[in-house]
Image (spheres, rainbow, N blue to C red):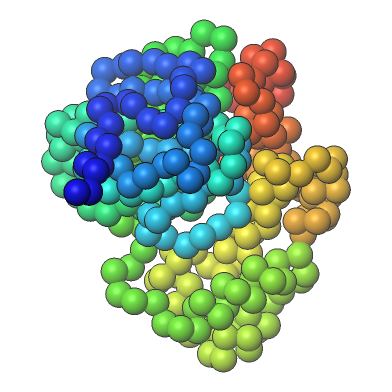
Amino acid sequence: MTAPRTAFTNGRFYGAPTIERQLPGVRLAHLAATMSAERVEEHSHDDAHFVLATHGRYLTTAWGPETEGPVLVYNPPGVIHRDRFVDTGGYFLAVSFAAQDWRDLSAAARTTAADALRLTGDSARRAALRLTRALLSCDPEPLTLEGLGLELAAQAMVQPFDSHRPPPWLAVAETFLADSFDQPISVADLARAAGVHPVHLARGYRRWMGAAPGRRLRTRRLERAADLLMHGRQPISEIALAAGFCDQSHLNRQFARAYGVTPGEFARLCGRRQPDVSTVQDEAFAPA
């Protein structure tokens, strides 16, 4: 007889909270993963929730393109999955909405994603990272936390990609970007690699990726920088060059604009069990 799948109640995960806050309509937690990958079985959650893996390699079956950098996933209430960290020592942000609260939000927005999604857009990652920073700060303002939680929720209220199947050339172009992101690339180069006209390529990128080719190139470079910051030990100046930026200041500007945190702050959020609040707040930032 097959053992029943685990169904977690609201806000519960395979993890031990380092900090946890219950707010009207949303529960926030920063957790240390407690289960090795081989022991994580298929399971579900009563709530709708977002998971941002801030430290460690995270595997998910959620729909969406695989990217480098922090993994951000949305799971609807009741979806069965086996998302997990590859190794022990993982840490993650969890943002949970009780099923009825989520239905109310979805009804107000008149739409919501029905399937588990990988959220890879700048706005989604920026909202999740700003929320992580705020939650781990010394005395977070509840209104700020609640607002950022709803800002993240909005990312699942609209399907991020066109519902039609993307053309095969798009995968070829994306592979070319992934292999050549640290080199100067023109639209003609990308179109030549994909075997389509540059105008057709530009129009297709806007339709299926929601961004121009140049923005996708910048996104690829930022993802590589984020991945190196999460898992490497190189100085940020070296990471900037390895990711295709001309220097560290260029990376700093682009990273902060895209994700809402600087590379140094991102590395601390991802690399400490319980980030030191004094170091988390030591860089000049506009209030969240």
Residue at 22% in and 42% down: 4
Would you identify the image quadrant in which residue 78 lies? top left
Residue at 28% in and 31% down: 8
Would you identify the image quadrant in which residue 76 lies? top left
Residue 27 place in picture, x, y as percent: 33, 22
Give the total of numbered labels: 0
Say if 171 sits above or below 210 in the image: below
Residue at 25% in and 27% down: 9
Residue 170 place in picture, x, y as percent: 49, 78
Q: Residue furthest front?
A: 1
Say if 230 sits above or below 284 in the image: below
* Left-right relation of 157 to 222: left
Residue at 26% in and 26% down: 10
Residue 254 seen in the current view: no
Residue 268 place in picture, x, y as percent: 68, 28
Q: Nearer the viewer, residue 170 or 187?
A: 170
Residue 252 place in picture, x, y as percent: 73, 41
Q: Nearer the viewer, residue 285 or 122?
A: 122
Residue 228 seen in the current view: yes
* Left-right relation of 75 to 68: left
Say if 210 sits above or below 174 in the image: above
Q: Nearer the viewer, residue 228 or 159?
A: 228
* Left-right relation of 20 to 274: left
